[in-house]
């Protein structure tokens, strides 16, 4: 099997879902419970119209995911959260039930929120994953090579020697297609999943309503337990396309409005997360000068 097997870079349609599925879920979507303006109600209406499931993975909060699960009807809703680590990486946690998700959040996320609540909590990647070990959940490395100059991808930090490669072994899966990333970086993510035999997921990382469903994870099981099991057992496929540069710009502009009130604490967190890069740069300069 190659990294491209089971990853289809094309428009998501009902026909393609039926061919590869039958279940299809956008595994990475944000609402106004964190850094989006999209309501859960609008998200659920669009999901029903498109015939896809959804994982509401708001940053460091679960209220949107809980609302979606309560109103799911016939929609496959995967309880989830995107935990933003103190050292940069974003971690997608998917739970088999609401009680487990609530318990994890109340014990290991809410007490560690910072003044910029969506940007990072006070625990690093290794600790976030370690604390998830006692829970029935699936751990996925979000956009492992992104974003931009920030340390928001797990493998990006590993490659920069900020953490050990063994950290990836604690994850069940890798997000092999993130709608907000470039094709090149998503291809590298797919190769990463194949090299370390991790499960594969795809999602839009959408913050705008029309993003929903443009990247989906497709599996043979139509119930929650079976679908998450398909991810872990590497039975899922991914269909979709990355956003265009214009779409990314529009989305980024909308997201920024949610951070304006947290400007100063956000700058502090960005400084802390990028300090290792600066220290390494200075260390390399000193080494070359010897």
Image (cartoon, helix red, strand yellow):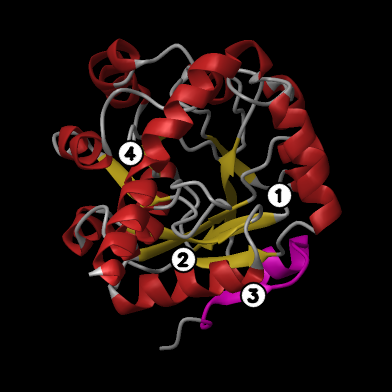
Give the x, y percent position of residue 93.
37, 39
The C terminus: image quadrant: bottom left
Q: Nearer the viewer, mark 2 or mark 3?
A: 3
Q: Secondary structure at mark 1?
A: loop
Q: CA distance from mark 3 to mark 4?
A: 32 Å
What residue do we see at 66% from left, 56% from top? 215
User: What residue is disc 4 on?
Assistant: 87
Residues at marks 1 and 4 touching, judged by CB atoms closer than 8 Å: no
First to last magenta residue range:
4-19
User: What residue is disc 1 on?
Assistant: 213
Q: Is residue 271 magenta?
A: no
Q: CA distance from mark 1 to mark 3?
A: 14 Å
Q: CA distance from mark 4 to mark 2?
A: 29 Å
From this view, report whether residue 32 is shown above or below residue 210: above
Examine the rendering and report whether any part of residue 138 can be seen.
Answer: yes
Q: CA distance from mark 2 to mark 3?
A: 12 Å
Q: Secondary structure at mark 3?
A: strand
The answer to which image quadrant residue 15 occupies is bottom right
- Few, some or many C-alpha atoms within 10 Å of disc 4 (few <14, some 14-19, many ≥20)? many
Which of the marked residues, 3 or 4, is nearer the chain's N terminus?
3
Examine the rendering and report whether any part of residue 49 can be seen.
Answer: no
- Few, some or many C-alpha atoms within 10 Å of disc 2 (few <14, some 14-19, many ≥20)? many
Q: Nearer the viewer, mark 1 or mark 4?
A: 4
Of 90 and 281, which appears nearest the observer?
Answer: 281
Marker disc for residue 8: 3
């Amino acid at each position: 099997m190659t990294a491209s097997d089971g990853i289809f870079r094309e428009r998501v349609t009902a026909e393609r879902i039926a061919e590869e599925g039958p279940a299809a879920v956008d595994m990475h979507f944000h609402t106004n419970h964190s850094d989006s303006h999209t309501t859960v109600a609008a998200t659920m209406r669009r999901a029903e119209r498109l015939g896809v499931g959804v994982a509401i993975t708001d940053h460091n909060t679960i209220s949107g995911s809980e609302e979606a699960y309560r109103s799911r009807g016939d929609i496959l809703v995967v309880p989830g959260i995107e935990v933003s680590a103190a050292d940069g990486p974003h971690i997608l946690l998917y739970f088999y039930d609401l009680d487990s998700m609530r318990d994890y959040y109340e014990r290991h996320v809410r007490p560690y929120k910072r003044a910029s609540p969506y940007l990072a909590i006070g625990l690093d990647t290794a600790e976030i994953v370690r604390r998830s070990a006692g829970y029935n959940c699936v751990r996925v490395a979000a956009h492992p090579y992104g974003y931009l100059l920030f340390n928001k991808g797990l493998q990006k930090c590993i490659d920069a020697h900020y953490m050990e490669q063994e950290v990836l072994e604690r994850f069940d899966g890798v997000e092999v297609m993130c709608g907000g990333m470039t094709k090149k970086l998503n291809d590298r993510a797919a190769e990463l999943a194949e090299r370390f035999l991790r499960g594969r997921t795809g999602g839009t990382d959408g913050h705008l309503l029309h993003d929903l469903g443009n990247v989906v994870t497709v599996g043979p099981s139509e119930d929650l337990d079976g679908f998450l099991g398909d991810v872990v057992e590497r039975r899922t496929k991914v269909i979709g396309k990355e956003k265009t540069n214009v779409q990314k710009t529009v989305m980024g502009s909308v997201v920024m409005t949610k951070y304006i009130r947290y400007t100063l604490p956000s700058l502090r967190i960005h400084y802390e997360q990028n300090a290792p890069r600066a220290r390494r740069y200075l260390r390399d300069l000193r080494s070359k000068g010897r």
